[in-house]
Image: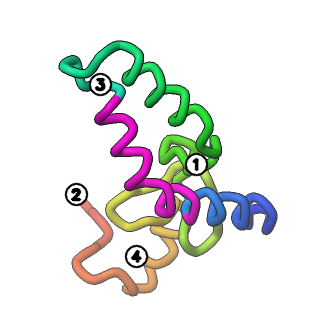
Amino acid sequence: MAKTSAIEKNKRRIRLAEKYSAKRAALKALANDRSLPEEDRFMARLKLAELPRNSSPTRVRNRCEITGRPRAYYRKFKMSRIALRDFASDGKIPGVVKSSW
């Protein structure tokens, strides 16, 4: 089980990323628009830099929904390999069967 503080920090980052996503996308569009004057594009970049760092979606860490483990994360199931194996062995994940050959 991961530290509760690390899990909560990640949840806070997710909330901030969702809150600022529209504003961040608009500023990025302005900053990358070649038809605008250079000063306007530069001002858009400055405003983008003023947004909170944790509002960037790249700062969000994929974590297991069950244990909070940050590594060996399967996106399809939103859980780590260890939790996935336990749930699959118990038959709690539909369509997943143990392989044998």
Dot 2 and dot 3 residues touching (CB under 8 Å): no
The amino acid pointed to by label 2 is: Trp
Tag 3 or tag 1, which sits nearer the N-term? Answer: 3
Q: Which residue lies furthest to the top in this view?
A: 38
Residue assigned mark 1: 71
Q: Which of 34 and 25 is in front in this view?
A: 34
* Magenta-drawn stretch contains 87: no
Dot 4 and dot 2 residues touching (CB under 8 Å): no
Residue assigned mark 2: 101
Dot 1 falls on a residue whose secondary structure is loop
Nearer the observer: mark 4 or 2; the answer is 4
Q: Which of 37 and 76 is in front in this view?
A: 37
Q: Which mark is residue 88?
A: 4
Q: Is residue 44 left or right of residue 69?
A: left
Please give the name of the residue rendered at 24% of the width and 25% of the height, measured from the top-left corner. 33
Magenta span: 15-30
* Magenta-drawn stretch contains 16: yes
Tag 3 or tag 2, which sits nearer the N-term? Answer: 3
Separation of marks 4 and 2 at Cα, in angstroms: 18 Å
